[in-house]
Image: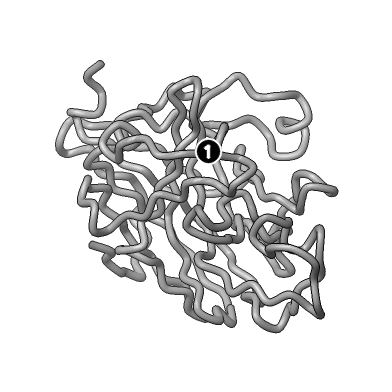
Amino acid sequence: MTTDSTSRPETPGQHDGGRTYREDFEHGPGGWWGWAGNHEGFRRFELAPSAILSRSPWWVDYNHAPPGAGYLHMIFCLNTKGPLGESMTDLFQRNKFVDGKYPQNFLHASLTFRLKGEVRLRGAQLCLLLQASDSTLTSGWVLHGQPLNITADWSEQTIQVMPYLDQWTCLGGRQSRLDYYGHLPLQQVLANVNINLMLILFPLQISPMGPIEGDRHLLRAGRDYPLWASDLPEGYIVMDRAEIHFPETSLVK
């Protein structure tokens, strides 16, 4: 369950013998990245004092259009496995999660984010996404059951990663990407998050601007046809701390 606090502990707790990743963005993004779209590629964050800021307009990720779970915005993203390309390192610095060889087993992990912002959500929620691959298929699961609140003042919120199916949505893939995106069991994904984690805005309301020829879900929203931006989330989100605590069981291989 998501819990809220405005406190900012000076040191992460490791009372259970586990291990804690922490990024406070004092020296830049620390490997966290954003996405500007298929044509633009990676997006640099605006750098606030010891924080990263993501501002709309955000790219509409159409890779999970129906028959997948729907469309989303990628807000804050972190790769959990290397090696990483030089271009990503140049843009977003060294990835401290990968460099520190933190666990990819997120079962029973707790993730704490300290953030604030102003967003007109328009039906979306800020949710955690975890993605994994079994070498032939990539599967992403959204923790819709524990959304994060976006408030004008700083708020520290903690998410508990538990394998409860009623809290998660598998993204699946759009019709043309079913060879790449699909369904892997939730337990398998949470136990080996070997691609990335994201904070996303999901689901999005997609409204074509004007008539289109063909199925709007087979076409690529925002690329093959224009969208009404007024139906999409709008605003900004700032994050100044991300912390992931792995219990001792996550360290056992």
Residue, far front: 214
Horizontally, residue 18 falls left or right of residue 54, namely: left
Residue extending farthest to the top is: 253
x%, y% of residue 173? Answer: 53, 46
Quadrant for the N terminus, please: bottom left
Q: Please identify the quadrant where the C terminus is shown.
A: top left
In the image: residue 252, left or right of residue 169:
left
Q: Quadrant location of residue 49?
A: bottom right
Colouring: one colour
Q: From the image, tell me which residue sits under label 1.
A: 181
Image coordinates of residue 215 in percent, x first then y, are 68, 63
145 vs 21: above or below: below
Q: Tell which of 20 and 73 is nearer to you.
A: 73
Relative placement, left or right, of 103 versus 41 is left
- Residue 31 in the image: x percent, y percent? 61, 37
**Residue drawn at the location 36% of the way across and 70% of the way down:** 6
Residue at image coords 40%, 33%: 193
Residue 157 appears in view: yes
Residue 182 against residue 236 in the figure, above or below: above
In this view, which residue lies farthest toward the right? 39
Quick check: 221 above or below 87? below
Element under disc 1:
loop
Q: Residue at x 37, y 35 (%)?
A: 184
Q: Residue drawn 46% across and 24% down? A: 100
Q: Is residue 3 above or below residue 182?
A: below
Q: Please name whichever residue, 228 or 101, is drawn nearer the observer in this view of the structure.
A: 228
Location of residue 166 by image quarter: bottom left
For label 1, count other residues whose C-alpha is less than 10 Å away and answer few (under 14), some (14-19) or many (20+): many
Which is nearer the eye, 226 or 200? 226
* Residue 172, horizontal then vertical, whole percent: 47, 46
